[in-house]
């Protein structure tokens, strides 16, 4: 499969990452670059997707970057891994729904290898986990499609600071919380990225 896997060891500034994706998107469309899965972390930042509302910002002092991905407001930062995509949907029957299903199932299958049971939700996009009597989000998904190339991607919480989410209404959902994998099971998630890539490549 002709998909490049790129892993950045140092945090990448959000705007730089998006500019890189958009420049490469054009090259892919012209047949001058491979499709891409890019794994990285961002520094502490709040981003707002195309459907966010101002009342979802609880702390007006936060620095917010407006972005052209789908979805609402979320936080990125240390302890959270990001998977960005540049995937040509013309090679995949132009099926956006199926691409989202591949992302969801790849995360769910990978976490199952750690005996962690998670699920997707059609009404509230993302990956969720039942924790005691509440439902909490473990991964947020935000995709945009341009010229039939899907980009942006998903974030998965490993051991990030959950307090950061108290400054916003994450993804516009008031009655559900956010958690991370370390709070669910204190394990070594060193190989989780590889597991997710393997499951993604099986289905893309």
Image (cartoon, rainbow, N blue to C red):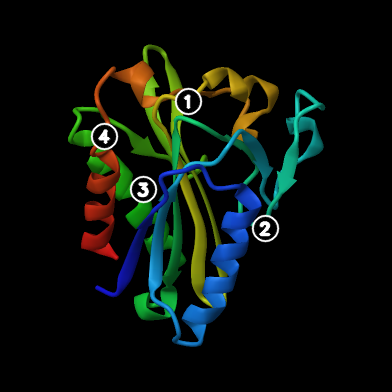
Q: Is residue 29 toward the left or the right of residue 36 in the image?
A: right
Residue 180, compared with residue 23, is above or below; it is: above
Q: CB of mark 1 within 8 Å of CB of mark 4?
A: no
Dot 1: what SS? loop
- In this view, the residue farthest toward the front is 10
- In this view, the residue farthest toward the top is 132
Q: Mark 3 = which residue?
A: 104
Q: CA distance from mark 2 to mark 4?
A: 31 Å
Q: Tell me which residue sits at (29%, 75%) in the image.
A: 2
Dot 4: what SS? loop
**x and y percent of residue 114 in the render?**
20, 30
Q: Mark 1 = which residue?
A: 160
Residue 83, compared with residue 173, is above or below; it is: below
Tag 4 or tag 2, which sits nearer the N-term?
2
Q: CA distance from mark 1 to mark 4?
A: 15 Å
Q: Quadrant of the C terminus?
A: bottom left
Q: Mark 2 = which residue?
A: 68
**Could you tell me if residue 55 is visible in this image?**
yes
Mark 3, other Cα within 10 Å: few <14 / some 14–19 / many ≥20? many
Q: Mark 4 = which residue?
A: 190
Tag 2 or tag 1, which sits nearer the N-term?
2
Q: Tell me which residue sits at (38%, 77%) in the image.
A: 93
Q: CA distance from mark 4 to mark 3?
A: 20 Å
Residue 129, by quadrant, is top left
**x and y percent of residue 159 in the render?**
41, 24
């Amino acid at each position: 499969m002709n998909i490049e896997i790129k892993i950045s060891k140092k945090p990448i500034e959000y705007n730089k990452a998006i500019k890189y994706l958009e420049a490469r998107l054009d090259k892919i469309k012209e047949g001058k670059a491979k499709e891409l899965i890019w794994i990285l972390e961002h520094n502490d930042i709040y981003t707002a997707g195309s459907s966010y509302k101002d009342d979802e910002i609880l702390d007006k002092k936060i620095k917010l970057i407006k972005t052209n991905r789908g979805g609402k407001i979320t936080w990125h930062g240390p302890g959270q891994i990001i998977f960005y995509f540049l995937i040509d949907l013309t090679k995949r029957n132009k099926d956006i729904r199926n691409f989202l299903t591949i992302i969801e199932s790849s995360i769910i299958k990978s976490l199952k290898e750690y005996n962690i049971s998670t699920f997707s939700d059609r009404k509230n996009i993302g990956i969720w986990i039942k924790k005691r009597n509440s439902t909490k989000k473990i991964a947020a998904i935000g995709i945009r499609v341009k010229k039939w190339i899907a980009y942006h991607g998903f974030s998965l919480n490993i051991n990030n600071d959950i307090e950061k989410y108290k400054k916003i209404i994450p993804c516009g959902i008031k009655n559900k919380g956010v958690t991370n994998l370390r709070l669910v099971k204190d394990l070594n998630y060193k190989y989780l990225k590889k597991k997710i890539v393997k499951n993604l490549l099986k289905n893309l």
